[in-house]
Amino acid sequence: MANVGRFFVRLRHNRVGLLGFVLATLVLGAALLGPWLTQVDPLRQNVLARFQGPSLGHLLGTDNFGRDTLARILYGYRTSIAVSFGAVALSTLLGSTIGLLAAYLGGWIDRLLMRLMDVLLAFPIILLAIAVLAVLGPGGTNTALAIGVVYTPIFARLARGPALTVLSWDYVAAARAVGASGGRIVLRHVLPNILAPILVQTTLSLSTAILVEASLSFLGLGTQPPTPSLGLMLSQSRDYMLISPWVSIFSGLAILLASLGFNLFGDGMRDLLDPTLRGRDV
């Protein structure tokens, strides 16, 4: 708890990280408190109220079905956060495990695992996610699995490099000499020393995962209607931009806000957790 307190004290003096933290907190708050922030059903249609602009009755206007844009954005945040957090959690766990195993076991296992990760890294993120969804089918859960597969090699590479360095330290050799098991060495001595870059990459990956989820939903491969999704809202409103641009504008801004918040917070965490960057004027 003391370390967490010191982190937030230092975060207050990092303008970029603090701004990112505030934005990310607002996005998470909107996702978690959506049902309490608006009493409007995001699926309720009212054809008589189609294409309305911002007003007291509908603060962000309505879409082509007369659905409240604010309510759909709040619930869309829930979808984006759930998919993105699930995907990044999966890739962090799977990728870090692969990287640690490759570093500890070495030899042909290390080469085999890393060549497999290189193959996955050779594909563009969106293209690989589309290929996975072509096999699994569209949907929110499958989108999380697809993004998780896409990000796994990033965390595998990130975990393997520092792990190799830690495994060469004297106290790890001493632990081996006294008979410590491989699992104990990895969990007690290696993992705590590589957590900082993994945490930073996790936060930065959330930023891009939100964009990837929105992109896949925009293409019709992610979250399926009528479930609110920011990318799906952007896709459905593009045909009506000349009539009523409000849905496109506000859903695009919502995606920007979420991605920017986690990106800036990740940059701030990197500055605070990297010893070579501490004390830098930001």
Image (cartoon, rainbow, N blue to C red):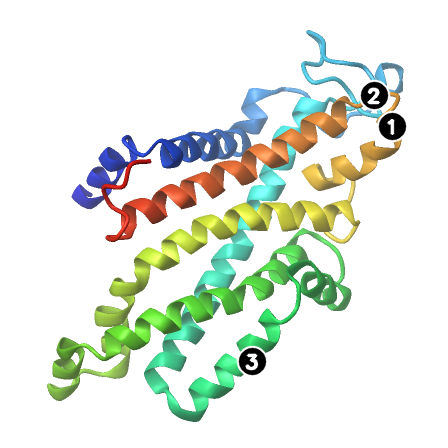
Mark 1 nearby-residue class (10 Å; few <14, some 14–19, many ≥20) = some
| Residue highlighted by disc 3 | 116
Q: Where is residue 273 in the image (x, y as percent from the top left)?
A: 28, 50
Q: Which of the labelled discs sits on residue 244, or is there none?
A: 2
Q: Which of the labelled discs sits on residue 240, or is there none?
A: 1
Q: Position of residue 166 (x, y in %)?
A: 25, 73
Q: Can residue 41 be seen?
A: no
Q: Nearer the viewer, residue 229 or 172?
A: 172
N-term-proximal mark, 3 vs 2: 3
User: CB of mark 1 within 8 Å of CB of mark 2?
Assistant: yes
N-term-proximal mark, 1 vs 3: 3
223 shown above or below 229: below
Give the amino acid type for the residue marked by disc 3 in the picture.
Leu
Mark 2 nearby-residue class (10 Å; few <14, some 14–19, many ≥20) = many
Residue 137 image-quadrant placement: bottom right
Q: Can residue 34 be seen?
A: yes
Mark 3 nearby-residue class (10 Å; few <14, some 14–19, many ≥20) = few
Give the amino acid type for the residue marked by disc 2 in the picture.
Ser
Give the amino acid type for the residue marked by disc 1 in the picture.
Tyr
Q: Position of residue 43 (x, y in %)?
A: 75, 30
Kind of element beneath mark 3: helix
Mark 1–mark 3 distance (CA, rounded to whole Å):
44 Å
Q: Where is residue 187 in the image (x, y as percent from the top left)?
A: 27, 70
Q: Where is the N terminus found, in terms of image quarters? A: top left
Residue 184 image-quadrant placement: bottom left
Kind of element beneath mark 1: helix
The structure residue drawn at horizontal position 31% and vertical position 77%, both measured from the top left corner, is 164
121 shown above or below 73: below
User: CB of mark 1 within 8 Å of CB of mark 3?
Assistant: no
